[in-house]
Every structure is written in structure tokens, then in C-alpha cells.
Amino acid sequence: MIYLSLFAISFLAATILPFSSELTLLGLIATSNYDNLLLLIVASFGNILGSVINWALGFYSRNLTTKKWFPFKDKQIKKSSQWFSKFGKWSLLFAWAPVIGDPLTLAAGLLRIKFIEFLILVSIGKVSRYFLIYYFI
């Protein structure tokens, strides 16, 4: 059950919702009651899948970004687009970063970044972040 909870928190943390998957993972690793490698895998998979949802939202909802209910604000999208202008698809390595990470994944979809490139770069960044938490605890 704890693995499912970690997956859900990690998934939701990759959206605009304010969840902290890092703190959750850190706490679970610190308790030493669980398989740490499995915790790392579950958190990574959930967080990457959440980013895939953001990419799909961007890719398939280009005309919806002006709607009031759309989860990302113009300011976030503009900032993420600036990152893309400056660093290109490599900015997706920072999809884990607070504030800019989630909009970056949406912007990748809006800008039609190829899915496989998106998936590889986002996965590298997110797994590396969780691995550092795992390694240093």
C-alpha cells in the first residue's frame, strides 16, 4: 500500500498540484522499513508518468491554453518557452525543478517535442534527482 501511495504522490507532484515526492521518498528511505530500490523505481515511474500527462496536455490541447480552467498560467508557459528558446530540448533535464519543471513538460508538448526525446530527457533528470536522494540518505 505504501508503494501505491508513493506512486500517487510522485505522479501528482509532476502536475501543477503542490505535492513533495522528494520529502515522501526521503522519509520512507529513512525509516528503512521498505525496499529502497523499489521505492526509487516507484517514485521515478510515478513522476515520469505525471510528466507524460503534462506533455500530452500540451500536445493535444494547444487551443485550450487560453481557457481560465487550464492548469498552467500564461506566465509559467512563457517562462518555460524562454527556457526552450535558450536551451532547447535539453532544458527537459530540469523537468524535476520546482516551479519551472511542470510547465516545461507542458511546453514540450505545446512545442511538439518528439515524445521519445521527451521521455528520455525527462527520465534522466527525474531518476537522477531521486537517485541522489537515495544515495545521500
Image (cartoon, rainbow, N blue to C red):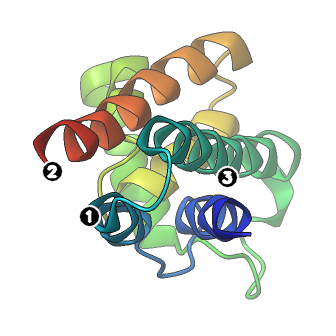
Is 86 situated above or below 6? above
Residue indicated by mark 1: 30
- Can residue 90 be seen here? The reply is yes
How far, Cα to Cα, is label 3 from label 1? 25 Å
How far, Cα to Cα, is label 1 from label 2? 7 Å
Residue indicated by mark 2: 137
Q: Amino acid at mark 1?
A: Ala
Q: Amino acid at mark 3?
A: Gly
Q: Which of the two residues, 41 or 58, is positioned nearer the viewer here?
A: 41
N-term mark: 2 or 3: 3
Q: Amino acid at mark 2?
A: Ile
Is 103 situated above or below 52? below
How far, Cα to Cα, is label 2 from label 3? 25 Å
Mark number for residue 50?
3
Residue 22 x %, y %: 34, 62
Query: Which callout, 3 or 1, points to the residue nearer the camera?
Result: 1
**Going 88% across and 44% down the picture, which residue do you hit?**
60
The secondary structure type at the circle numbered 1 is helix
Residue 111 x %, y %: 62, 32
Is 108 situated above or below 75? above
The secondary structure type at the circle numbered 2 is loop
Neighbour tally class for label 2: few under 14, some 14-19, many 20 plus, Cα within 10 Å: few
Q: Say if mark 1 contacts mark 2, CB within 8 Å.
A: yes
Query: Which callout, 2 or 3, points to the residue nearer the camera?
Result: 2
